[in-house]
């Protein structure tokens, strides 16, 4: 899902809904999201929006063309069918757009948390050689011995046929047996000795411990607990060595001309390494984050939203897979 602008959450919140899946145009100017059975379109450059009821977004064809679909009602004679439409956002009438609501008056929408029970790394997969136990090696040697035995039997049958006479009949047995089992022996040795299995980096039963509240200027200790899921057939699962954590803040900055601007910023970042195993076989990642009041021109207040997001540092996108809100506390007197 695309990372939606805060205005999308605010407009959806004011209409009593939560934003669903969304899309972003290739130039980043427009965003479209499913809200309350309709499509909400926002123009980030002009700070305006449009709500199209009864249709669902399917994506942007180009920078300024949005494709939507609407499902017609089924009748007793015809089944329901899908109606595809294209909305050109460059050629819109004057009353198509509406200005964004002012969050200083309407308030801010609650931050949408993302707390999955399971997570699998999206980094490029890695493979490793399959490690075998003593019992696996014994079974491998027995299977190899059987294949070699039949290959040698076929070879001997060919040599028996060279004696001539009625023993030429051994050639009908020796050629197919030797050819088949010699090839099977080579394939068996090559494939088993070079066999590799994928390693899936994943965690399940995720829980983030972040304390009772958060104060600016004081360190915040975060701990992520999880367990390594059971492997599926032909793979091995492992916990990630590192997990990145960011302390994020969303605030509203008032401009000199009376306007306002959404301000999303990263106040601190750290990398948590896989530590000791916690209770019940759970792995633990721990780190500290701290925000300072001088990092932004806007002072934190009750309307400022704080959250911690976790991401995989080995992924190129750096998109978070875990987002949780923080309870902001005023500074100590």
Image (cartoon, grey):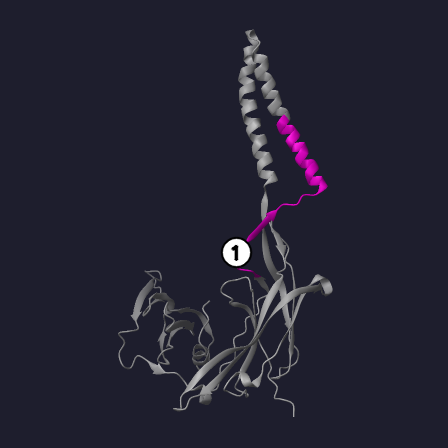
Q: Is residue 130 magenta?
A: yes
Q: Quadrant of the C terminus?
A: bottom right
Q: Secondary structure at mark 1?
A: loop
Nearer to the camera, 237 or 110:
237
Name the residue located 56 percent from the left edge and 19 percent from the top edge: 174
**Can residue 234 be seen here?**
no
**Can residue 304 be seen here?**
yes
Q: Is residue 95 magenta?
A: no
**Quarter holding residue 154:** top right
* Depicted 93 relative to depicted 175: above or below: below
The total of numbered circles placed on residues is: 1
Q: Position of residue 188 (x, y in %)?
A: 59, 34
Name the residue located 60 percent from the left edge and 66 percent from the top edge: 243
Name the residue located 26 percent from the left edge and 78 percent from the top edge: 93
Q: Which residues are magenta?
A: 120-148
Q: Badge 1 local density, few (<14 within 10 Å), some, or many (20+)? A: few
Left or right, 24 with respect to 184, comes to: left
Name the residue located 56 percent from the left edge and 11 percent from the top edge: 162
Q: Position of residue 223 (x, y in %)?
A: 66, 71
Left or right, 179 with respect to 12, comes to: right
**Quarter holding residue 295:** bottom right
Q: Position of residue 255 (x, y in %)?
A: 42, 88
Left or right, 161 with respect to 24, comes to: right
* Depicted 77 relative to depicted 271: above or below: above
Nearer to the camera, 55 or 154:
154
Residue at numbered disc 1 = 124
* Depicted 241 relative to depicted 53: above or below: above
Q: Residue furthest top?
A: 165
Left or right, 19 with respect to 130, comes to: left
Q: Position of residue 284 (x, y in %)?
A: 67, 66
Q: Residue furthest front?
A: 294
């Amino acid at each position: 899902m695309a990372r939606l602008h805060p205005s999308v959450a605010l407009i959806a919140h004011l209409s009593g809904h939560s934003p669903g899946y969304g899309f972003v145009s290739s130039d980043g100017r427009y965003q479209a999201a499913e809200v309350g059975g309709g499509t909400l379109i926002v123009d980030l450059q002009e700070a305006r929006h449009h709500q199209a009821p009864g249709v669902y977004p399917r994506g942007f064809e180009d920078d300024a063309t949005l494709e939507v679909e609407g499902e017609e009602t089924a009748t007793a004679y015809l089944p329901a069918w899908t109606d595809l439409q294209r909305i050109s956002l460059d050629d819109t009438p004057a009353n198509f757009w509406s200005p964004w609501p002012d969050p200083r008056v309407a308030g801010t929408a609650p931050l949408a948390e993302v707390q999955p029970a399971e997570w699998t790394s999206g980094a490029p997969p890695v493979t490793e050689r399959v490690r075998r136990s003593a019992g696996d090696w014994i079974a491998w040697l027995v299977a190899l011995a059987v294949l070699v035995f039949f290959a040698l039997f076929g070879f001997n049958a060919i040599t028996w046929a060279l004696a001539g006479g009625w023993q030429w009949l051994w050639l009908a047995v020796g050629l197919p047996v030797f050819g088949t089992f010699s090839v099977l022996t080579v394939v068996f040795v090559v494939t088993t000795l070079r066999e590799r299995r994928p390693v899936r980096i994943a965690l399940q039963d995720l829980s983030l411990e972040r304390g009772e509240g958060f104060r600016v200027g004081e360190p915040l200790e975060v701990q992520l607990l999880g367990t390594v899921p059971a492997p599926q057939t032909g793979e091995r699962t492992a916990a990630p060595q590192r997990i990145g954590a960011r302390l994020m803040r969303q605030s509203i900055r008032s401009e000199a001309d009376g306007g306002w601007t959404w301000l999303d910023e990263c106040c601190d970042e750290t990398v948590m390494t896989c530590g000791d195993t916690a209770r019940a076989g759970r792995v633990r990642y721990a780190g500290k984050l701290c925000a300072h009041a001088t990092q932004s021109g806007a002072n934190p207040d009750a309307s400022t939203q704080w959250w911690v997001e976790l991401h995989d540092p080995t992924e190129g996108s750096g998109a978070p897979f875990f987002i949780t809100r923080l309870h902001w506390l005023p500074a100590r007197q």
